[in-house]
Image: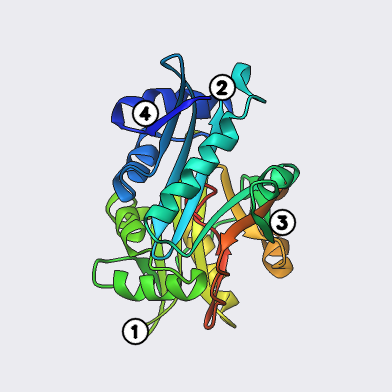
Amino acid sequence: MAGISPMGRADIDFALDLTAREGWGFLRKDLERLLALTPNGSFIARLDGRRVGLLTTICHGRCCWIGNVAVASNFRHGGIGRQLVRHALAFARTRGLDRTSLVCRQELSGFYRRLGFSAGRAIAGMSGTPGKRVPAARDASVVPVTMALLPRVARLDSDCCGDNRSAMLTSFWRDMRGGFLVHLDGKTVDGFIVGKPGAGAIEIGPWTARRGKEDAAFALFHALRAEMRGPVELYVPAGQRHLIRFLEDEGLRVNHLFREMGIGGPRPPAKEARMLAIAGLEKG
């Protein structure tokens, strides 16, 4: 049995090394954000005092989102991953949260089913370097998010995911001014998009738009491309075929299939808007 303890800032170098070995491309700021938004919610596994695994969570409203789950390659298949997940579930229960969710690779869904999770929607992981010409002028309806706009952005996000993620969105606003854009129709927020620089690519998400506002969604994508050039990656609900075709036309390709898994109450249905890309596997 491994010893499990909360992750602290002194563990960040270990976490960066372990996740880099998995090719996940996290930056120090990404892990600092998780530790700040959910104190004592990320964990380190130790054997004989040696760090051998990690798990991160971020709590939004009534949901605990399990993100990175990684065990050093020479310590796998010994139950450490199961210990970490069970520890995270216990953490969520102590906070009185309604559900715990995550996104895993399709081939790992059986591991989580055995721990009591139920399968939800399929998620398509997409990546590539957009090749189409960026419009000469940005759509005038797309502007950087301001502090004054954040409450409206958070309400639209909450409609999509059923939780209050305003703390996370505020953190994005502080760190990614040029990569956090909103589409306005007068005073109405029709959608927003976030582009987060990573070690190898720009991670797009969350990306939302009101139902029937596909033009706003596409304008947001093109405006973000004008702000942040280079390879991108994002995670799109696989049922949104129209969006996937748009992204394929832009030069992206589906490279992995994932599955959303959950324990507890169901995610409240979205009413006015759709989540086009989640905030990343570690943030939901």
Left or right? Give the position of 270 relative to 56: right
* Residue that label 3 marks: 248
Earlier residue among tags 2 and 1: 2
C-alpha separation, residue under disc 3 versus residue under disc 2: 35 Å
* Residue that label 4 marks: 12
Earlier residue among tags 1 and 3: 1
Quarter of the view holding residue 133: bottom right
* Residue that label 1 marks: 187
Residue plotted at (35% across, 57% down): 168
Where in the figure is residue 190, as x and y percent of width and height?
46, 78
Residue 255 in view in this figure: no
C-alpha separation, residue under disc 4 versus residue under disc 2: 15 Å
Q: Does the residue at mark 2 contact the one at mark 1 (Cβ under 8 Å)? A: no
Q: For mark 4, does the 10 Å Cα neighbourhood hold few (<14), some (14 to 19), or many (20 or more) residues?
A: some
Earlier residue among tags 1 and 4: 4
* Residue that label 2 marks: 72
In front: label 4 or label 2: 2
Q: State whether residue 130 is above or below residue 221.
A: above
Q: State whether residue 210 is above or below residue 93.
A: below
Q: Nearer the viewer, residue 42 or 250?
A: 42
Of all residues, the one furthest to the front in this rendering is: 1
Residue 236 in view in this figure: yes
